Image: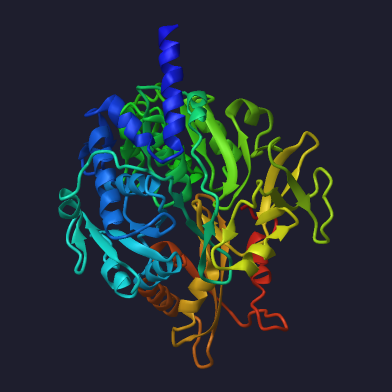
Amino acid sequence: MEALKERESLDERLAAAAQTGMTVSVWAELYGEKPYIHDPSGRTRSYAQVNANANRIARLLREAQLKPGDAVALLCSNRAEFVEVLAATRRTGLRITPVNWHLTAEEIAYVVNDCEAKALFAEDRVAAAGPAAADCPKLIVKVAIGGPIPGFADYDAALASHDGSDIEAPVLGNQMMYTSGTTGRPKGVFRPNTVVPMVNMFAARGYDEESVQLCAGPAYHAAPLAFDIGAAMGAGAQLVFLDKWDSEATLRAIAEKRVTHMHLVPIMFQRLLALPDEVKSKYDVSHVKFIIHGAAPCPPEVKLAMIEWFGPIITEYYAGSEGGAGFVIDSHEWLKKPGSVGKRPAMLGSKILDDKGGECPPGVPGTIYHQLPPGGGFVYFKDQAKTQKSRVGDYFTLGDVGYYDADGYLFLTGRDAETIISGGVNIYPQEIDNELIKHEAVADSATVGVPDEQWGEQVRAVILLKEGYSPSDELADEILAFARANLPGFKVPKKVDFVSELPRSEAGKIQRNKVRAPYWEGRARQI
């Protein structure tokens, strides 16, 4: 009975702290010097250290006259400083935008400028950080994590002069992730009303004082940020960061760190399952309590094999950076409805519409629309046209296609946008075409996603050559080398196909669906 009262008292404290972004402070008071964050480098930060550094960063930003509503950009890999900066913005009313550190300098500068960041925290391993910052004239604060960056203050030195005790008058901060359509530049998904973290969900997911959370994906991505970092902050779980994917190293970390909770994507499932049986049998995973996955479709046979290995502890979600009705399905329910992403939610509506705006009957695919929460939910930052284009009344779409079965379970069948989803990462073909067209031999380009058994989709460049150039393996290799020199690695096409013509509409727009269709003939293109 006494333990129950203590738990209820702690839950009340956490709920109150969540209102002002001070949840980490509660855990620091409770756990003190107990290890909290385990970096890939082997460094460990305690709860007390993380909380103190968050307070120091908060004071640094306040001293620079940043006020609630101002923006901070974070260009950082999976390491403790990522959490410290995040925790600082959460308690100062600031809006944080984590930036994909694999982008080019020009792409990083675009996001930093577009989100209107006044402060940039960047890791020294990101070579593009300095050049990007040079093109961001509105930055007031520039802090280098891990090592020197010209023009940046050193992280440790900048924090050293500030008090680590809890700040006065904390204010709950916001975050703005970046997504994109098929026409180029990413857009910020802005929620005018800050979402208060729900701390009452963690007990249902099996979190307790012994919980250990694994973050195997990039911290800047919405899903690891929410399901790994956000969960660890809310539940007080230790957080184990991995720097890059290595199947056996991941399995070893799960076993040695006694990981209990993790977020994975299907390609990670596939790579773990591909390990030899003798390797898998070396590592105990019986302590794992909860695995959540999403971001890309999971082949049913892969998911079934994971359930057989780890047990019925796997939960799937379907949503986007913009939000959504929040489809969730656990292992027990999924085994009855394999391939589904969950039942129609009770809290917010969801409907399937045909091209004319009518609701589709069960079994008939259409565009999936999600009901906006009270107050409007989100807007695309500084892009009212894109915001309105995605909406029908108080519903919005992510561009996904699917159907409900007779029992109200949703099945995804495709996507009406041109976005390529490879290994759970969105890739926007127009950005790739914009670079390929610069090659002297390329007259026109239509990049598409083609089937890939491991990644879901792979990037394929379909090229129309200029007169005087002939298709050859050598020219294909030259174009791919050109792409590698001008694009982040995950956007580089895996192969080039040459064609004699590319279909365009009367308005001059590439009809990408016609280019893509032959590759998907006889199979459903999944989201």
Rendered image quadrant of residue 408: top right
Image coordinates of residue 48 in percent, x first then y, are 24, 34
Q: Nearer the viewer, residue 144 or 461?
A: 144
Rendered image quadrant of residue 61: bottom left
**Residue 73 drawn above or below residue 404:** below
Name the residue located 82 percent from the left edge and 58 percent from the top edge: 357
Residue at the farthest bottom position = 468
Residue at the farthest top position = 1
Number of numbered discs on residues: 0
Image coordinates of residue 446 in percent, x first then y, are 57, 74
From the viewer's perspective, tell me whether residue 334 is left or right of residue 265.
right
Can residue 46 be seen in the rendering of this structure? no
Name the residue located 53 percent from the left edge and 89 percent from the top edge: 466
**Residue 129 drawn above or below residue 90:** below
Rendered image quadrant of residue 237: top left
From the viewer's perspective, tell me whether residue 377 is left or right of residue 12.
right
From the viewer's perspective, tell me whether residue 82 is left or right of residue 43.
right
From the viewer's perspective, tell me whether residue 37 is left or right of residue 234.
left
**Residue 398 drawn above or below residue 104:** above
Q: Quadrant of the N terminus?
A: top left
Image coordinates of residue 514 in percent, x first then y, are 68, 70
**In this figure, which colouring scheme has been used for the structure?**
rainbow
